[in-house]
Image (cartoon, rainbow, N blue to C red):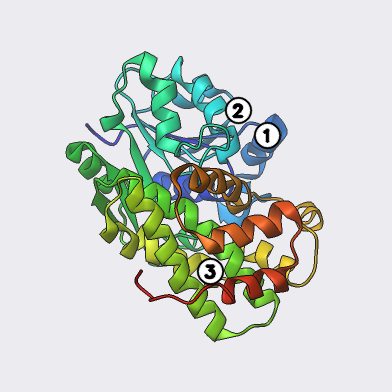
């Protein structure tokens, strides 16, 4: 394996940040977008003014709207599209991807219909092409796109069952400001990455209600307990949830000013409707759709996740935020580590 061409599939803020990182390392990097007019603007302006303004494209970053052009010679294909479009995009890729390409997921979510993680969706789609699940990777951790594009020190985790591929990807993405660790706990990385967005909506609600630091700290701590509980039930390792993809990304998303999911929660706490909030956003807050997926998953597995349940009630049943918080606090008392 060598660091040949890389295809980044998804020209939003995170996909663009990763493409910038790789191209500035001297790697030939294609950036695929699904809207022709957006890709045309990327080519003309050499900047993603719609989703990540202020960062000019280096010469080796090549925007394209053609999937075949994007992936046909790629050694690594990194998927960075919203979870609701994930299966459709992978289906487009699989017949034009070169044999032996390494697939990496950088999307944080759980598919609504199947309740599968993104690498599980990827495995479904690629199975008929003979690509084993052990060769699929996932990139996860506390990493706002704007800060990565601005070369702010960041640390993330690359997960892959195949340790040789994990080390290759670790070296591919590492820079002097972007430190990459490896893990084989794919389930843990993906479950923690998906669930932290739900907890961030809850944390935002607390901030929108002006509840202060005590409430936020309690919410983050108990949210981590819920994330870990579900992850372990699904076969993940507990220690993963205390790492970058778990605690690290949870703290970032629950407190950072750039967090879309926290923003949704803040606006809900201020009394705005979900429709009003979504109309004001031009980027996806994955936690909204993931809340529905995880709610269905929890009902299927029988996990105890009261924060998730209250976020679901607020998002999908119109429950008042103040009432949701009161219902959380007034549950039966019990030991902390039960």
Front position among marks 1 and 3: 3
Q: Is residue 170 above or below residue 270?
A: above
Q: Secondary structure at mark 3?
A: helix
Q: x%, y% of residue 196?
A: 48, 59
Indicate whether 29 appears above or below 156. above
Residue farthest to the front, as pictured: 332
Residue 277 percent location from the top left of the image: 76, 58
Mark carried by residue 248: none
Contact check, label 2 and label 1, Cβ < 8 Å: yes
At 44% from the left and 45% from the top, the residue drawn is 301
Q: Which residue is mark 1?
A: 40
Estimate the spatial distance between the alpha carbons at disc 1 and disc 3, rounded to whole Å. Answer: 35 Å
User: Dot 3 surroundings within 10 Å: few (below 14), some, or many (20 or more)?
Assistant: many
Circle 3 residue:
254
Q: Nearer the viewer, residue 83 or 283?
A: 83
Q: Please give left or right for residue 336 compared with residue 145 in the image.
A: left
Residue at which label 2 appears: 65
In-front residue for pair 152/162: 162
Disc on the earlier residue, 2 or 1: 1
- Residue 141 as seen in the image, left or right of residue 55: left
- The picture quadrant where one finds residue 156 is bottom left
């Amino acid at each position: 394996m060598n660091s040949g061409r890389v295809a980044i599939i998804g020209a939003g803020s995170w996909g663009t940040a990763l493409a910038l990182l790789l191209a500035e390392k001297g790697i030939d990097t294609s950036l695929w977008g699904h809207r022709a007019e957006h890709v045309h603007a990327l080519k003309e302006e050499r900047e993603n003014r719609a989703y990540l303004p202020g960062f000019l494209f280096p010469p080796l970053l090549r925007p394209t709207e053609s999937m075949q052009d994007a992936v046909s010679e790629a050694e690594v294909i990194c998927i960075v599209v919203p979870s609701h479009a994930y299966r459709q995009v992978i289906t487009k890729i699989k017949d034009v991807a070169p044999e032996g390409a390494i697939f990496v997921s950088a999307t944080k979510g759980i598919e609504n219909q199947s309740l599968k993680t993104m690498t599980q969706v990827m495995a479904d789609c690629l199975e008929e092409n003979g690509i084993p699940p052990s060769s699929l990777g996932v990139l996860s951790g506390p990493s706002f796109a704007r800060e990565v594009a601005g070369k702010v020190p960041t640390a993330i985790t690359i997960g892959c069952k195949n340790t040789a591929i994990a080390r290759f990807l670790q070296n591919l993405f590492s820079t002097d400001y972007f430190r990459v660790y490896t893990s084989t706990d794919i389930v843990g990385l993906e479950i923690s990455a998906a669930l932290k967005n739900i907890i961030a909506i809850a944390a935002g609600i607390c901030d929108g209600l002006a509840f202060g630091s005590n409430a936020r700290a309690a919410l983050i701590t108990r949210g981590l307990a819920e994330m870990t509980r579900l992850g372990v039930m699904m076969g993940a390792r507990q220690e993963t949830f205390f790492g970058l993809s778990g605690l690290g990304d949870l703290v970032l998303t629950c407190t950072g000013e750039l967090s879309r999911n926290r923003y949704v929660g803040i606006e809900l706490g201020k009394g705005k409707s979900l429709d009003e909030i979504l109309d004001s956003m031009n980027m996806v807050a994955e936690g909204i759709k993931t809340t529905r997926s995880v709610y269905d998953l929890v009902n299927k597995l029988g996990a105890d996740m009261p924060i998730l349940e209250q976020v679901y009630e607020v998002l999908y049943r119109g429950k008042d935020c103040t009432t949701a918080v009161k219902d959380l606090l007034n549950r039966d008392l019990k030991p902390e580590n039960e």
